[in-house]
Image: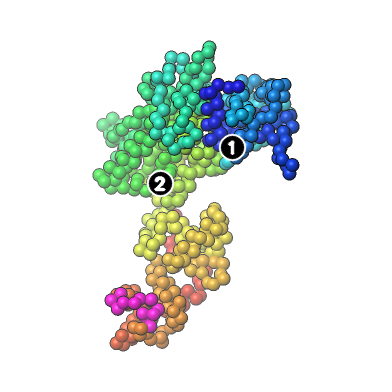
Amino acid sequence: MADPEIEAVVRGLIAGGESYNVEFKTAWNYGPDGKAPRDIKEVAKDIGEALVAFANTDGGDLLIGVEDSREVTGVPWEGDKLRYLEQSARLQIKDADLNASVFDVALNGKRVLLFRVSDYPSEVVVTVTGRCLWRRGNPARSEAVPPADIARRRSHRLGDTAYESAPVPEATLEDISIPSRILESRLHLKNMDLPTLLRYWNLVQGRNGSTVLLRAALLLFAKDPLRWHPNNRVRIIRSTGVQPGYGRGLATRQFEVLGPIERSLGESRQALYGQLEVESRASELFTVAQSLPREAVDECIVNALAHRNYAIEGSSIEIHLFPERVEFRSPGKLPEPLTIKDLQRRQGAHRSRNPIIMRVLRDLGWTRDQGEGMQRIFGSMAQVELNDPELEERADTFIVRLSTVSRYDAHMQAWLAAYGPFGLQPHERKYVVALQQAGGSRSVDKLARQLGETFDKTRDALMTLEAKRLVWHRPHGRSYTLVEPLDVPHERAYNWFDSAHVSIDGSAVMTKALLRAALNIADDQSLVSAIARLRESGILVAAGPSQWRFGQSLLEYIVRRRSRPSRHTGPRSS
């Protein structure tokens, strides 16, 4: 049986649940007559396939004897059958030694087997039956993949991918510190001591009977980060022009956040947002930078720290602030064969340069599923209607460029601003623009396809806009029609009077009592103010003492509304 430290690791893995790097497998079949042990050969096959998937991706941990629900049900076999299972990492893999670690752990009187395997960089790994698998998806799972896809990844694998996993014999546990504050919210981690945490995250390696720290541990948690990496830091550079300039034309101000990664994540965010706030107060040039969505900025910082090429020790991560953009520059190109086009497709393309670091960040809740980061960056920028991020590879640097310029031209922005007094929210503008681009009227299903979102989300947004009288549709109608900014008061007046069953025509004369009922206003002062506003907008005109009739502008709007024009005359977006 395993030692207490490994037992604590296994308990932590179970408490953390299945993930990209962790999978559970049961040893039991369940039926109407209760449970019975599975065919041991099938369990061995499952072990082989899971280890192949982990080895072909970023490595991981497999627990046998644990249900998907995290219930520990145990492994029923002993003796030769147990040894047969423990040898699955060798017997179920074809022509490859994964150097998997196997631990036999007792939890509450039940046996659990832990298989730990790292990624296998040299060649494609397949099962004895020829199956090739990898880990992907959300939630993560093992999926079959053509061996050629893995071979392509392996043929391009760069030497720097092994940088984080290199042992550092001269480092000791005294050289690192894992702050308790980052563990408080992670229930499966908070009670582990330092040696157990390091083994849990695979940040140590056994060598000649002793434990040796890996570079990843020092990059993440070193007390003196620059001792172990001269550029474990983030530089924030503010430029007053569209380019930083050189020599006498240098127009920059620099700030620096030292590592390790654990510290850099939080302090880089604080320093960047603090600098944006200072600049926005000091100069109009930087006011627009406040509109960058925090989700996009945070994700860019995490991606830079998690995926930079740490083997390039002469460069640091740089964040450049320009008047109309923020650039995140990370040492190292994309790990091949990942390309910029792969990321721009936003289909979850993923390739880890630093899988050990990524696993720790994900376990701490600082990043989420593999391949989703770029989707969140593009999505959050679109949500606030800014231009799509630009991606660039330059020399040995990967750059993500977030523009603070609206995707709409000045004419469109002015048109949208006219809706501001009527409660149009930033996240609702895309529906108004989409209707305008469609000619002013469109069905929910077609608008949803145009925007690339679900029918229900689009319908709910249109219903909210209709409650504000920014769009309307006929009873039982399928299409919603956009209301121009200047017509919103008329649309609201139409709904007030229509709900009160007041016929809107040029001959109708209304008394104060009728308007009180139609507008649902009780006190006289509020009623007088409401009537004054309606007269100012031309909706009502005087028809005599304490009498009013509908103004020509409202009557003309009603004619246009009833005709439901097929084209819309608003400005076109660029």
Instruction: Name the mark nearer the viewer: 2 or 1.
Output: 1
Q: What residue is rendered at 56% in x and 67% in y?
A: 478
**Percent position of residue 98, x then y:** 62, 22
Q: Is residue 112 visible?
A: no
Residue 140 sits in quarter: top right
Query: Secondary structure beneath disc 1?
Result: loop
Residue type for callout 2: Pro
Neighbour tally class for label 1: few under 14, some 14-19, many 20 plus, Cα within 10 Å: some
Neighbour tally class for label 2: few under 14, some 14-19, many 20 plus, Cα within 10 Å: some
According to the image, label 1 marks what residue? 70
> Between 23 and 53, which is closer to the camera in this rendering?
23
Q: Is residue 518 magenta?
A: yes
Please say if the residues under marks 2 and 1 sit with CB atoms less than 8 Å apart.
no
- Tell me where the magenta segment starts and ends, as one range: 514-526
**Percent position of residue 147, x then y:** 67, 30
User: In which quadrant will I find the C terminus?
Assistant: bottom left
Q: Is residue 218 magenta?
A: no
Q: What residue is rendered at 43% in x and 17% in y?
A: 171
The circle drawn on residue 293 is 2
Q: Is residue 41 visible?
A: yes
Give how far apart the Cα atoms at labels 2 and 1 are.
36 Å
Dot 2 or dot 1: first in sequence order is 1
Here the colouring is rainbow
Q: Main secondary structure of the magenta part?
A: helix
**Percent position of residue 30, x then y:** 71, 40
Residue type for callout 1: Arg
